[in-house]
Amino acid sequence: MNKTSDILVIDDEQVIIDAVIKICSLDNYSVDYALDVKTGIEKILKNYYTIIICDIMMPDGDGFQILDELRKKNISSTLIMMTGYSTVENAVNSLYKGAVDFIPKPFTVDELLSSVNRATKYHKIKEKQKQLLLENTIDELLYVSCPVKYLRLGYSSWMFQEREGSVLIGACDLFIKTIESMQEIEFQNIEDEIEQGICCASIKCGNDRVHKILSPVSGRIVEVNKSIKNNSSLIEKDPYFEGWIYRVIPANLDYEIKYLIPCSSDRL
Amino acid sequence: MFKKIGFRLIFAVALTSLVIIGVFAYFNVKSQSSSSISEVERHANQLGETVISSTRFDMMLNQRDRIQQTINSIGTQPQIRDVRIINKIGEIIYSSDSTNINKMVDKRAESCYACHAEDKPLEQISITERTRIFRVHPDSNRVIGIITPIYNAKSCWQADCHAHPPDQKVLGVLDVSISLAEVDKAIAIREWEIVIFALVAIIALGLLIAFFVRRWISNPVNDLLDATKQVSAGNLSYAIKEHGNDEIGKLGESFNNMTKKLSDARMQLFQSDKMASLGRLAAGVAHEINNPLTGVLTYSSFLLKRTKDNAEFQEDLKVIVRETLRSREIVKSLLDFARQSVPKKSNADINEIIDKAIAVIDNQLSINKVKIVKQNETNLPSLSVDANQMQQVFINLFVNASDAMGKNGGTITIKSQRISLSPYGSTQIKKATCPKRHSLMDNEFKIDGLSSLKVKVISDNKEGIIHLDPVYGKHRNVFKHDFKISKDTKFVCPECSISLIQQDKVCPKCGSPVLVFEIEGQGTYEVCSSENSDWEKWDFVDSAGLKEYIEIKISDTGSGINREDISKIFEPFFSTKGQKGNGLGLAVIWGIIDNHNGNINVESEVGKGTTFIIRLPLAQQR
């Protein structure tokens, strides 16, 4: 398989493609493009791309077809979904089905670049993990996967159901590992409403990049972890226990839980 | 004109009164004229007797001149047409009309026939038989004639002239004829009077009936007709203004009620239609705008990055990026509005959702001096709702209520309760059995055409039967026993005598034993055994058929809503808050409730406050 470009962008709007090409060239990514799903799939089969950025709704199909194709052909490209707000549920669904991130349209340069950078890092970690598996060297731990009883939204965030009906949410270690030079975390306040698939906390980095942690559930924040507020590096040290971010009263857990991946499945 | 109900009524009344008054008038005239005739008759008879007695003495002396003179002088009276005396062979011997003297009278003529029939001798005969009414000419006045027989007396055959033998009974007859012209005239006048009276009475009656028919029937019916025309033309806000308390008034009232409900239903339908298309439009617009917006945002933020050393550009580009981000938020809220169409339902406790909503804006409410009073019914069944959306509904309503109450604050009262608009009076029990599965349906005894449920009652060796109404909620039960129900009374299956009394349960209304029946495939039906209680319960039916709701009332003590505004408040982009609101709040609420198959209504009084009533159907639980 040839490697011609780092990124393939699939969208039916030329202006979006041009914008993505322009933005990605800022960080020296080479970008190929396709104007419809069919051409996109042809290109994926012909060439290997590290990252595929794909609009979720296109005239001749949707982003899920690309995801299915990747899985079917066992292609390890990472996929970022682009979506309008009207399809947040679709976007969350795409995370469940294997996309690493989604970018709501319209987006800024930094929003796109931070996502692409994370995806690149994610890809690297996954490739390295694959290599290690082949070499059978399990000693080196690249990231800590989340505990058995936890559920996660894509690779971004996790949630854990407490006994009192509340849930704890936090960021996955893999997500933290994809972020370089974390500077500070911006939290929401107690009593704020959060929504599944929408940003609930932002991690600021150097070079103006902001990485958004997508909330795994909808609900109302009843507690913000004070120790992480005082010491943001805790999220890197112990992301699953001491490094939880919010305690939340979920609003619609029964429904939303179907888009969450049980962490126990990672252990197989 | 005859198609008008008022005219038909008036016509019927006039016709009836015409017949009644006509018959009355006919008999009245008849009896009046016959009594006047008999008056004349009596008068003529008396006159005859008078003539005979006054001429008796002259006859005895055979002074014919004097007799003739007397008869003449009587005959000159204006009413009297003729006075004559006829002897036994029919010869007129005296007459006030001298031309008739010595003429023979035909004995077989009608006037003579009464006495001379079959040559019978003149005996005592009644006055009517001696009377005749006739016309001399067909066009002359009527005349009454009366014949008075002159009987033989002892003095007659002993008189000097010896003109009459003693065995002769009647010597002759006196015939007096009196003109009926005056009487007939009086009768004619009387007839006219009666006819005029009848006509006046009929017309007066007609007018009176017309007045009341117009007032009580025609006008209200026309109002109703106008109203139905208006409604069928689509004007559902039309209401009948005045209606009395009679049946037509009640009809008008229920008509108003009906149109109000119809207009409510139409509004809801219209609203949901509008919301749906508006949602589609919003989603379409948002989706289409998102792509060009992405172009603007990416390129401007790209430029912002590229021109870091040019402060002048930076300033302008920052404005572009900021405003584009603002547009992004607007599109997002538009999409939030459009997206409400798919509720993510799961079971939730509505009171909990209310509490959560209160918790979210508690601070804001206490700043605005708003007090919250909760009157929530505990242990409400859980509802299948989108908790997030419902919470949004309550938060919006609380914020609206708080805004309506202004700076001085007030009270928001929240009341949740389970209301049961159960399918009472419509569901029929078709198969009821005793615990041993004997059918209790009685096809012989029907209540309102439907087979009843039969229960045997036993008390102190006496037996009776209760027939229960098979229609749930109607309770037209028939009790056929002549003894009092006591504690020891048994209610049993007529076939196997197994008890039908529900153990450990009494009627919540009167404390009597409760009868229980098994309804095939539809649970059990319970009913109070007492004649005096109408308690009955059929859980299966009560819980089925979307007839149970949870009702949440949210009342404030705010400024209220104008009548003109109340029909518009659920419309998108309608706002009384000016720049503060986008006019989508209540429209979104409406959409959410509609998507939950519920309904939301508002009652408001300006200056007193507003109450929003939300009803959410309880899911069918089987």
Image: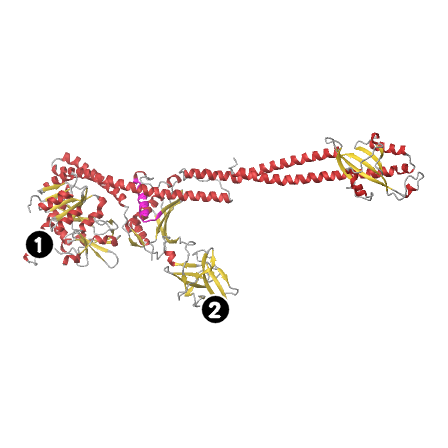
Q: State the quadrant of the C terminus of chain B.
A: bottom left
Disc 1 element: helix
Which residues lie in the magenta part?
B580-599
Front residue (pair B575, B364):
B575
What residue occupies the far right of the structure in this picture?
B160
Give the crowd class for mark 1: few <14, some 14-19, many >=20 residues within 10 Å. few
> Which residue is labeled 1 in the image?
A130
- Give the amino acid type for the residue marked by disc 2 in the picture: Asp
| Percent position of residue B599, x then y | 35, 47
What residue occupies the far left of the structure in this picture?
A135
Disc 2 element: loop
Q: Main secondary structure of the magenta part?
A: helix
What residue occupies the far front of the structure in this picture?
B118
Instruction: Determine the image quadrant of residue B125.
Output: top right
Give the residue drawn at x 89%, y 37%.
B59
What residue occupies the far bottom of the structure in this picture?
B461
Front residue (pair A194, A253):
A253
- Judge whether residue B529 is colored magenta: no
Residue B552's place in the image compared with B578, above or below, is: below
Instruction: Determine the image quadrant of residue B279.
Output: top left
Count of numbered tags: 2
Residue B558's place in the image compared with B197, above or below, is: below
> Which residue is labeled 2 in the image?
B488
Give the residue drawn at x 13%, y 43%.
A40
